[in-house]
Image (cartoon, coloured by chain):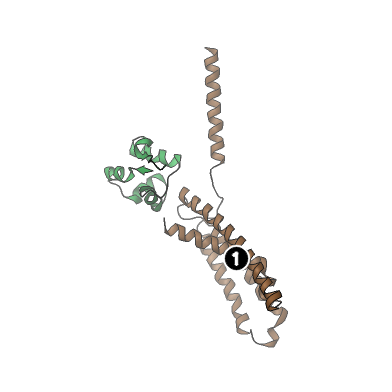
Chain colours: A brown, B green
Amino acid sequence: MQNVKYICHIVKHTNLIKMENQQNFQPKFRLLPNYFKKIGIGFVLFAFIILIPLFHYWKTLEFAGNYKQFFYVPFFDILILGLLLYSMAKEKIEDELIVLIRLQSIAKAFIVGIFFVIGWQLGEFWNDYIQEIKGSVFQSFGVLIVIICILISYILTFNSMKKKM
Amino acid sequence: MKNTIKVERAKLNITQSELAEKIGVSRQTINSIEIGKYVPSTTLALKLSKLFKITVNEIFELEEND
């Protein structure tokens, strides 16, 4: 009788441990509230507003050279922050299918990022050694553009998969 | 995997949106499950089973390809 009790005790606790472990492996993200999507869009729009003076004075000599950095750096930072906020915001109903779509989109964006970097390297090689063009804008902001590419790819994939649901 | 969600839903006379609201998912998720595009988790299957008052086996059925 004691043996049966002992076995029951072990089975009960083993099941409890299994349940706890299963919960730990559930794919869950700590995301921002849904209204952060609007804040993200606001940041992206603001980033483009920053660029307006740059395009306006693009051809004037006074504005050439290092002054452009004052606009490019905040533009890229605010744009990345906006895209990040948009992508990290929850959907109105964040259920398991959305979590699955999110995971698939992240995986696709990761692969797109890798191909983008490979393409980038080939493009730079073409510019530097074949066309002999040096000092492009892209060379200065390479990493930032790769991050933007990954974020945009994630957002586009996520939205397209969500529409196909 | 085949499922009888549409039939069970019709028996209860509820829409996809109402069913989605009752089990806490989006209407699109219910639609994806109904048309067989998405196989739900055990948790969601059990929630459906509880709502329809039938077993999970009665709702979902394996096909030859599965």
In this view, the residue in front, A116 or A34, is A116
Q: Secondary structure at mark 1?
A: helix
- Name the residue located 37 percent from the left edge and 38 percent from the top edge: B49
Q: Can the viewer see residue B56?
A: yes
Residue beneath the point at 56% across and 54% down: A107
Residue A30, x across and y down, in percent:
56, 50
> As displayed, is residue A49 above or below residue A86?
below
Q: Position of residue A115 (x, y in %)?
A: 60, 62
Mark 1 is surrounded, within 10 Å at the Cα level, by few (under 14), some (14 to 19) or many (20 or more) other residues, namely many
Q: Position of residue A136 (x, y in %)?
A: 68, 76
User: Where, by quadrant of the figure, is residue A13 drawn?
Assistant: top right
The amino acid on which the numbered mark 1 sits, given as a three-letter code, is: Ile
Position of residue A78 measured from the top left corner of the image (x, y, whole percent):
61, 68
**Residue A69 seen anywhere in this rendered image of the structure:** no
Q: Is residue A125 above or below residue A160?
A: below
Against B53, is A107 above or below? Answer: below
The residue under label 1 is: A148
Left or right: residue A18 versus residue B59 is: right
- Residue farthest top in this picture: A1
Above-or-below relation of B43 to A9: below
- Tell me where residue B11 sits by quadrant: top left
Please give left or right for residue A1 compared with residue B66 in the image: right
What chain is tagged by disc 1? Answer: A
**Residue found 56% across the figure and 41% down from its top:** A25
Q: Quadrant of the N terminus of chain B?
A: top left
Seen as rendered, the residue at the extreme bottom is A60
Assign the C terminus of chain B to one quadrant of the image. top left
